[in-house]
Amino acid sequence: MTNRKYMEQDFEVKIAAFLEEREKSIQWLNALSNPKWNNAYKHPKFGRMTAKMFLTNWLSHDYLHIRQITKLKYDYLKYVSGESLKYAGHWI
C-alpha cells in the first residue's frame, strides 16, 4: 500500500491544483470536434470499455469521493455534537 501522507498536505494547495487540472480537462473535452465516444478498449478485467464509459466513470469516481467526504463530515458532526441526528433523516 502506498502512503501518500494526505493529512500532511496543504489542502488549499491541493484543491487549487485539482481545480486547475479539472478545468484543463473540461476545456480539452469541450474542444473535441465530433469525439468518437463508442471507440473502445478491451480491458483484461472489465472487458470492453468505451470512451463514453471512461468519461462517465470519471465523473462517477468524483461523486464517490464526494460521498466519502460527506459521510466523514456527517460522522464528525455526530461525534463532536454528541446529539442524535435522527431528526435530520436516515443516512443510507
Image (cartoon, rainbow, N blue to C red):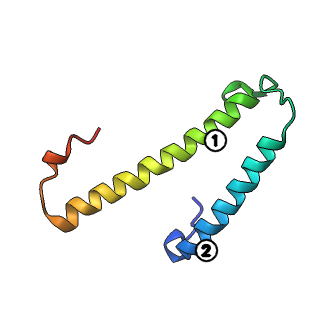
Q: Dividing the image into 4 quarters, which one contains the N terminus?
A: bottom right
Q: Quadrant of residue 54?
A: top right
31 relative to 85, above or below:
above
Pinpoint residue 36: horizontal percent, then vertical percent. Answer: 83, 26
How far apart, in angstroms, are the residues tagged by discs 2 and 1? 22 Å
The label shown at residue 67 is none
Can residue 1 be spotted in the picture? yes
The residue at 21%/68% (across/down) is 80
Q: Is residue 6 left or right of residue 38?
A: left
* Dot 2 or dot 1, earlier in sequence: 2
Pinpoint residue 44: horizontal percent, then vertical percent. Answer: 73, 29
The residue at 66%/66% (across/down) is 17
Pinpoint residue 59: horizontal percent, then vertical percent. Answer: 60, 41
Q: Is residue 25 left or right of residue 57?
A: right
Label 2 crowd bin: few (<14), some (14–19), many (20+), radius 10 Å = few
The residue at 55%/47% (across/down) is 62
**Closer to the camera in the image, 82 or 7:** 82
The residue at 84%/38% (across/down) is 32
Q: Quadrant of residue 33?
A: top right
Q: Secondary structure at mark 2?
A: helix
Can residue 44 be spotted in the picture? no
Please identify the residue farthest to the right as the structure is shown.
33
Q: Secondary structure at mark 1?
A: helix
Query: What residue is pinned by disc 1?
Result: 58
Query: What residue is pinned by disc 2?
Result: 13
Pinpoint residue 40: horizontal percent, then vertical percent. Answer: 79, 25
Residue type (three-letter) at the residue carrying disc 2: Val
